[in-house]
Amino acid sequence: MPEDLDSGNEEKMSSTLEDWVRNLDQGKVEEVDIPELRAALEAHGANFAELGEDDRRSLRKFSNAGKANGVRAVWDDKFSEYKRWTDDVADGYPEGTLPHLEKSGSDTAGMKAFFGELTALAAGEMSIGDFRKYEEVRIQNGIFFAEGHKDERLTIVTPTSEGKPIKIASVPPGFPSKAWSKIMSW
C-alpha cells in the first residue's frame, strides 16, 4: 500500500473493497477501483512491479493452467499456499455438496480461478467486463448448486470452449469473502 495513505484513507479503502467483495458473494460484480485493488493486494504480498511480458500473457489466459505462471510471478510462494488452502476449504464441506467440474471432478477449480482472475484484474490484464462475465456465472452456479438447483446452472462461452457454451467451475456461496479474508491475512 502506498506509504502516503493515512489510516483514515486506509480504512476507507478497506471498507470500499470489503463492500465490493460482499457484493461478489451475492453474485453482483460492480465496478472497482483497480489501483485501489492492486494496492490492497500489494499490501498483502502481491508483486505486480516485476511482471514480464510472458507473465502478463499468462494472466490473460482463461484456464487455471494457463494463468499459473503469471499468478505465481505475482504471488510467489503464496500461490502454493492459496492452492493448499482451497483443498482445506473443500475438505470442510460434506461430500457432494461442493460444486465441481463435471469432466475432471475438481471441486477447487472455481476457487483457484477466482484467485487467478482477481490477480489478472488487479494486474490490468483482465477487464472488469470479463471479470464480471466469469465471476457472475461462477458465483450464481455455486448458489444454484448449494440450493439443489444443479440443472439450472448457467453456461457461458469462454476463450477455451470453441464457441460452445459450457458450465465453468463455480465457487460455493460466500467464497469471495473467504478468499478475500485469506488474502488479507498475509
Image: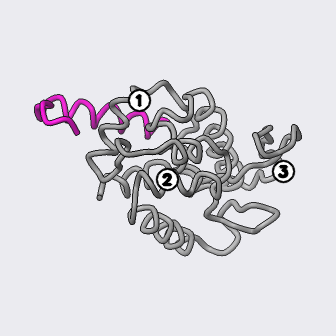
Q: Is residue 73 above or below residue 132?
A: below
Where residue 134 appears, as percent x and y from the top left, is 65, 39
> Residue visible at 27% across and 37% down?
14
Q: Are marks 3 and 2 in contact (CB under 8 Å)?
A: no
Q: CA distance from mark 1 to mark 2?
A: 17 Å
- The earlier-in-sequence mark between 3 and 1 is 1
* Residue highlighted by disc 1: 34
Q: Label 3: how many residues lie within 10 Å, few (<14), some (14-19) or many (20+)? A: few
Q: Identity of the amino acid at label 1?
A: Ile
* Residue highlighted by disc 2: 71
Q: Label 2: how many residues lie within 10 Å, few (<14), some (14-19) or many (20+)? A: many
For residue 6, which numbered disc appears in the image? none
Q: Which residues are magenta?
A: 1-24
Where residue 84 appears, as percent x and y from the top left, is 48, 71
Q: Identity of the amino acid at label 2?
A: Val
Judge from the rendering whether residue 74 lies leftward or rightward of residue 132; answer left or right. left
Q: Identity of the amino acid at label 3?
A: Asp
**Badge nearest the viewer, 3 or 1:** 1
Does residue 6 appear in the picture of this structure?
A: yes
Where residue 99 appears, as percent x and y from the top left, is 69, 60
Q: Are marks 3 and 1 in contact (CB under 8 Å)?
A: no
For residue 151, which numbered disc appears in the image? 3
Name the chief secondary structure element in magenta. Answer: helix
Mark 3, secondary structure of its residue:
helix
Query: Considering depth in this image, is 17 or 51 the residue closer to the camera?
Result: 51
